[in-house]
Amino acid sequence: SIQVAIDAAGTGSRILVGDGVYDSGGRTYGTYLTTNRLVIDKDVVVESINGAAHTFIIGAEAAGGGCGDSAVRCVYMSQGTLRGFTLTNGHTRTGYSAHDMQGGGVYSAVSLTPKVEDCIIIGNRAWGSGGGSGYCTLERCLVTGNEANQYAGGTFGGTINNCLITGNVGSYSGGTANSALKNCTVTDNAATNASFGCGGAYQGTAYNSIIYYNNGNTPNVSGNFAGFKYICTTNSYLPA
């Protein structure tokens, strides 16, 4: 399995993964309770041979469906790089710490900036924030069709470069929240909270990006941005 290879690998190793569906096994990390299909806890590169169209890491819904105690997230990362996978059907727990309820597809609770590159993050769900990803660095990824009960159906936190974030749904923000966007397109996301909901990007930073055609009480951009420059958007509110 991929996990056995990671556990056996030394720091700096490159682990090549063959085509297939990886949907069995799982473990928790540290004191967190959510089970993860894969844990990358060292500085290694885990890379598919033929890309995301051929290599799938699949989480699981809880018994009875959706998020819950027996749900399985796709990937937890504290270090390293994940490259060229489809991450799908990852789910989180409910009613526990924020770490157990965020990042249905991929999540990191530390500041070592693990990287997710050339991946498709699709059809995942978080009970808290970040249906697709939480606190990771994403490069050249497609983040689509993910859901969060709170903020950011697509990405919560982290650095998001050269990514397409589309078709995600969250209560308070659809596409992203508290993320640092650069060279991204954020479109066709939706926030469902009728009185406070930003369809596109909520807070964080945004540079050289398109944030357009999202749906919500505030369609595209809302909140306080630490940086906001060279953005294509339309909105009743724009950050200074």
Image: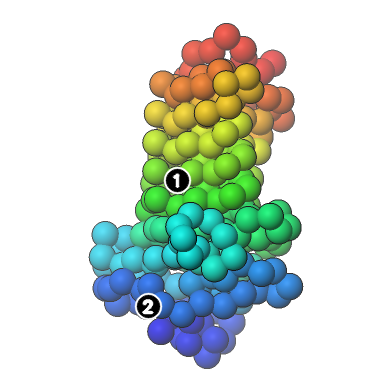
Question: Residue 87's quadrant in the figure?
Answer: bottom left
Taking depth in this image into account, of 175 and 125 the one nearest to the observer is: 125
Q: Does label 2 or label 1 sit earlier along the sequence?
A: 2
Q: Quadrant of the N terminus?
A: bottom left
Task: Residue at 69% x, 69% y: name it.
Answer: 32
Residue that badge 1 annotates: 146
Report the residue marked by disc 2: 16
Work out which quarter of the rendered image holds the C terminus and state it: top right
Left or right, 156 with respect to 82, comes to right
Q: Is mark 1 on a helix, strand or loop?
A: loop
Pair 2/1: label in front = 1
Residue at position x 48%, y 72% from top?
Answer: 37
Can you tell which quarter of the image residue 222 is in? top right
Confirm whether residue 118 shows in the render.
no
208 is higher (above) or lower (below) than 102: above
The outermost residue toward the front is 64
Q: How far apart are marks 2 and 1 (CA)?
A: 27 Å
Which amino acid does the dot numbered 1 rest on? Asn
